[in-house]
Amino acid sequence: MILLLVRHAHAGDLARWKGDDHLRPLSKSGRECADALAGLLAPYRPERIISSPLVRCVQTVEALAALLGVEIELDEALAEGHGTQSEEVLGSILSSPDWGACVAVTHGDVIANFITHLQARGAALSPPEPRWAKGSTWVIRRNAVLPDAVEATYLPAPE
């Protein structure tokens, strides 16, 4: 099982956004990053894409979903501020034997909580310090021989 944990790409400036933050879209650079992410993540052949319902998260994986012909599932537990709920959702995805790879796109606070949680449980992180820049991905793998062992590799946002 591989979990591709993605932080949404750059969205427009919150201070300049006049509407509901849930509706704030990706910026031009964020859309370019999202397009590049599709090429970066497609070789993992994810069979499932789950997203926070916030527009910037959904837009981050639209190109990937179109490329793969996979529907984007929305999950409120992946929205900002859902730390414990997100850990449960992401943990259940990671422990599921039902698919080979899954993409989950979410927010910085959710990724910070989950990566810190994995690290506290002994996951091997590469690099060892948690990171979660916009448009970046953590490739999280369960060890086939030792199912409780987890390895996570950070991929910076594509340029």
Image (tube, grey):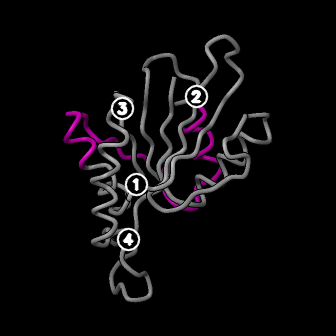
- Nearest to viewer (mark 3 / mark 2): 2
| Circle 1/circle 4 CB separation < 8 Å | no
Q: Which residue is mark 4?
A: 11
Range shown magenta: 63-92
Q: Inspect the magenta stretch and tell me whether residue 153 lies in it.
A: no
Which numbered disc covers residue 158?
Answer: 1
Q: Could you give the CA–CA distance between mark 1 and mark 2, rounded to whole angstroms?
A: 21 Å
- Nearest to viewer (mark 3 / mark 1): 1
Q: Which residue is mark 2?
A: 141
Query: Residue 69 location, x and y as percent?
Result: 20, 33
Q: Could you give the CA–CA distance between mark 3 and mark 1, rounded to whole angstroms?
A: 21 Å
The quadrant where residue 138 appears? top right
Q: Residues within 10 Å of mark 2 (few under 14, many from 20)?
A: many
In the image, farthest residue toward the front: 159
Name the kind of residue labelled 3 in the image. Arg
**Element type where label 3 sits in the image:** strand
**Element type where label 1 sits in the image:** loop
**Element type where label 2 sits in the image:** strand
- Nearest to viewer (mark 1 / mark 2): 1
Q: Earlier in the sequence, mark 2 or mark 4?
A: 4
Q: Residues within 10 Å of mark 4 (few under 14, many from 20)?
A: many
| Circle 2/circle 4 CB separation < 8 Å | no
Q: Could you give the CA–CA distance between mark 2 and mark 4, rounded to whole angstroms?
A: 28 Å
**Element type where label 4 sits in the image:** loop
Name the kind of residue labelled 1 in the image. Pro
Q: Could you give the CA–CA distance between mark 4 and mark 3, rounded to whole angstroms?
A: 24 Å
Name the kind of residue labelled 2 in the image. Arg
Decide whether the magenta segment is chiefly helix, strand or loop.
helix
Q: Inspect the magenta stretch and tell me whether residue 71 lies in it.
A: yes
Residue drawn at point x = 72 percent, y = 52 percent: 129
